[in-house]
Amino acid sequence: MTDFYCIIRNNKIVKDGVVLFEQENKPDNDFLTEAYDKLGISYPKFYKMDRLSKLGFIAAELLLSTIQGKYQADELAIVLSNSNSSLDTDLRFWDSVKTQASPSLFVYTLPNIVIGEICIRHGIKGENLFFVSPQFDSDWISSYVDMLLVGKKAKFCLAGWIDILADRADVFLYLTDKSISSSKISERYHSWNN
Amino acid sequence: MKKVWLLADSIISPLGFSTEDNFMQVMAGATGVKQTDFFGDQKVCVSHLIDLKPTAHFTRFEIVALHALNELKRQVKLPSKRTLFILSTTKGNIDVLENGQPDHPRIHLHAVTAMLAKELSIEKSIVVSNACTSGNVALIVAKRYIERGVFDHAVVLGADVLSKFVISGFQSLNAASPEPCKPFDINRSGINLGEAASAVLLTSKPQEFEIEKKISILGGGISNDANHISGPSKTGAELAMAIKIALDEAHVRHEEVDFISGHGTATVYNDEMEAKAFNLSNLSATPLHSLKGNFGHTLGAAGVVETVLSAISLKNQQLFPTYGFEKLGVSQPINILKKSQLKSIRLGLKTASGFGGCNATLVLALEN
């Protein structure tokens, strides 16, 4: 059974309970760039991404490397959620409108763009969708993932929560090919909270 | 799996405040798209609900959304128990930024959704925000939960309003046409934005309502291009994949599809990609229409608006014309009607594609 998860919050990156990267007192963007450098991969598009996409890119990189070569393009589904949609980038884009509207910011003013970036990077063509809810809703996400896996809409699901606004990032992504109980997902989401 | 019925619906747009009014206007060849300088110095062509204003309690987005819900409530007593409420939107109340209210509590999509769900006394609500496929995706999500019996009913609301935020964004991408848009036409030059709201009641228990069941949702499919975040696939293979998933789920063969309600945004690349996808799906001869010339591109509302119009098209046995289309301008053969047509039809395919590379398709059926 495939079962991996990744948490990015409080300037820490944790995979399956192990801290992979930690950088105290750094603004989020510096933290993300340093984390990207630490991953040791070369993907120049990373630098043009907004912060939501950078977070998703890093978490997906850590999780999807575990199943490389084990799925066809249409066998992996991505189901993400957050509370702030793309507001972090919306505010930056709206700032640009006051002088000259920035097309490179505008394309990131939708929450599902992070899914698009992950799909491009990994050649994923399966089901993909973005929910917005006030908090991480483990019942909702796990039930939707179950429907996809049981209904054979996907062999693997990359799912979870990816939220950023101002100086607060909160990412919990998991990768699975089997049903995982909502309580177990919730327990993992709430780990590494300090 | 339980059958999922589309039992009641509404559309609020500049063409009318009910599904029937919008249907009659489309059949009569009307458009809500007009040139305006309302949203800034540059002239734009948009479909604008100019008479709907915010109130002391509600934003413009909320006023438009509430009109759609109220029109639905006029037809049917909406259920609240075992009911799911889904809001499909891209930007919700984003215009509070230009009104100088960045701290407005309902700038958050989940907060405006909770408020609307409370108006309907529905406990469980969620937002689907998947760019221009949001409406189709929201209907697919609702179908999945209802057919498995997790919920008995769902109210799905698609809504987006015009804002300087969105208009300036599309202008910055050179994607907004200053002229009325021309889907699939040789002279097409980009999209017209529009605003609308559309609501539907889906249910597996039509016997609980005093409305005759006619339209069912038979299948849904979602895919990603994995190509570009703001440009469509070069081949259309991924939209074709979403079409295949929906047809397979519906147990429908391509030759049984009576019409396609396409996305047809009138950008050079989108319409070309769709033509390729329909050919890959053996649907090149199937009557195809785009409603963007009538309504503009209403973003998160579009999928719901166009699904509802597909449903009334089935009920009336009428195929839609494509407003703005004159001469074919894509590299593959497709069958676009310039005039409406009476025809015996049973199955409709609704497709959409959007930023982030997403595609989502639905199969609708007129049942005996």
Image (tube, coloured by chain):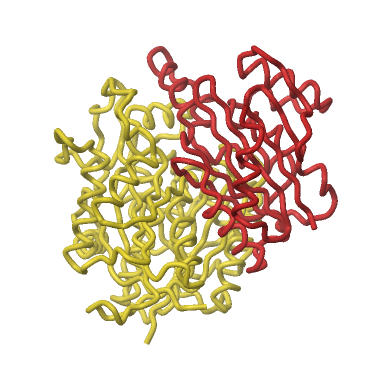
Chain colours: A red, B yellow
Q: Position of residue A107 (x, y in %)?
A: 52, 31
The residue at 67%/67% (across/down) is A152
Vertical position of residue B143 compared to residue B227: above or below: below
Q: Left or right: A156 with respect to B143? A: right
In this orientation, which residue lies closer to the viewer: B308 or A136? A136
Vertical position of residue B303 compared to residue B209: above or below: above
Q: Quadrant of residue A54?
A: top right
- Is residue B276 something that shows in the picture? no
Vertical position of residue A81 compared to residue A181: above or below: above
Q: Left or right: B260 with respect to B47? A: right
- Is residue B89 something that shows in the picture? yes
Q: Left or right: B283 with respect to B166? A: right
The residue at 20%/38% (across/down) is B58
Q: Position of residue B40 (x, y in %)?
A: 28, 23
In this orientation, which residue lies closer to the viewer: A158 or A184? A184
In this orientation, which residue lies closer to the viewer: B190 or B4? B4
In this orientation, which residue lies closer to the viewer: A132 or B29? A132
Vertical position of residue B244 compared to residue A172: above or below: below
The residue at 54%/29% (across/down) is A164
Q: Position of residue B172 (x, y in %)?
A: 45, 25
The residue at 41%/79% (across/down) is B346
Q: Position of residue A46 (x, y in %)?
A: 69, 26
The residue lying furthest to the bottom in this view is B368
